[in-house]
Amino acid sequence: MRQLDHSLYVVSTPIGNVLDLSPRGAEILGMVDVILCEDTRVSRKLFDRLGIQVNGLAIYNDHNAIAVIPKIVESIERDHKAFALVTDAGTPTISDPGYRLINACIEKDIKYTVIPGACAAIAALTLSGLPSDKFLFCGFADSKKFDELAEMNTTIILYEAPHRLLATLQKMKKYFGDRVVSISREITKVFEETVRGSLDFLIDHFEKNSPRGEFVLVISPRNRAIDDELEALNPLIRRLAGRIQNDELSRILAEFSGISKNKIYRYIYAMQSKGDIC
C-alpha cells in the first residue's frame, strides 16, 4: 500500500448510489488515522456497505468545527496524524463548514488535497439542461434574497427541503416570473426525478405529487430581450404608478407594448418591492 503524502484529504462521498465513491477515495479512507464525519452513524453505514475498514471516526460539523479545529491541527503537527474529511453525502465545503478546516491548514502550511466526486448542485445543473457556462450556487433557498437574485443574469442553483418546497415556489413566482426552473430529487437513486417547466407548472405538479426527498432547484437566467423591453417602460411606470392600480396599469402597458400583462405586473411589483416606486 502506498504512503500518504498529505495530512488532510477532503473526500467526496456518494449522494445516493454508493458505487459513486471513487477507488482512490475508498483507498484513502482506509489509510488515514481519523475520518472526520458530519454524522459518524451515517458514514459508518456507508463504509460498512462498501467493506472499507477504517481506523477511527470523529465528528466534525457546524456545531463543533470551531472547537475541534485546533485539536485537529495539533494532532497533525505533533502526532503526525493523517485525516480525511467527509460529509453525509457529496463534497465537503459545499454548504458545509469544511472551508474552516482548509483555512486552518493554509495558515499552518499543512499539506492537504481533495479527492473529487459527487456534488448534488453540479449533478442537478447537468440534469437541468440549462446554461452552465455561468452559474451561482446559493445553498438553501432564502426568500429574503430572491429580489437580489432575480436581478442576476445567470443560472442559479438552490437547495430546498421537501416540507418547504411549495411555499418556496410560490414566493419565487413574485420575483422570477416565467423563467424555466428545473427541480431534481433523489439524484443517482432508484427514484431519481427531474421536473422542468414554468413555476406554475411546477407548483401544480408538486401539489398533486407530495414532495419527497431533498431537492435541488436550478433557475434559468433572465430573458435579456424581455428585460430590455420592460426597462423601456420604466419611465412610464414611474410616472403612472400610484395614479392607476397595478392591474389596470399592467393591462394598458401590455396593449401598448405587446408584452404580456403578467410580465409587466411582476415587473411593477418588483419595482415596488425594492422601493423604486410607491
Image (cartoon, rainbow, N blue to C red):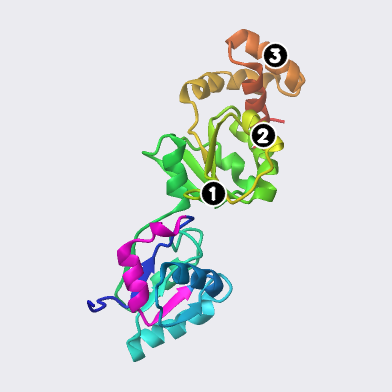
Relative horizontal placement of residue 274, taking residue 108 as reference (left or right): right
Residue 277 occupies quadrant = top right
The segment highlighted magenta reads 17-36
Q: Residues within 10 Å of mark 1 (few under 14, many from 20)?
A: some
State the residue position of label 2: 203
Q: Residues within 10 Å of mark 2 (few under 14, many from 20)?
A: some
Q: Nearer the viewer, residue 238 or 63?
A: 63
Residue 170 occupies quadrant = top right
Q: Residues within 10 Å of mark 3 (few under 14, many from 20)?
A: some
Q: Earlier in the sequence, mark 3 or mark 2?
A: 2
- Magenta span includes 31: yes
**Percent x, y for residue 106?**
34, 73
State the residue position of label 3: 251
Residue located farthest toward the left when viewing the structure as drawn:
2
Can residue 47 be seen here? The reply is: yes
Residue 208's disc number: none
Can residue 271 be seen here? The reply is: no
The N terminus sits in image quarter: bottom left
State the residue position of label 1: 186
- Magenta span includes 149: no
For the residue marked with disc 1, what is the amino acid?
A: Glu
- Label 3: which secondary element: helix
Q: Nearer the viewer, residue 30 or 256?
A: 30
Main SS of residues in magenta? helix
Could you give the CA–CA distance between mark 1 and mark 2, rounded to whole angstroms?
A: 19 Å
Could you give the CA–CA distance between mark 3 and mark 2, rounded to whole angstroms?
A: 25 Å
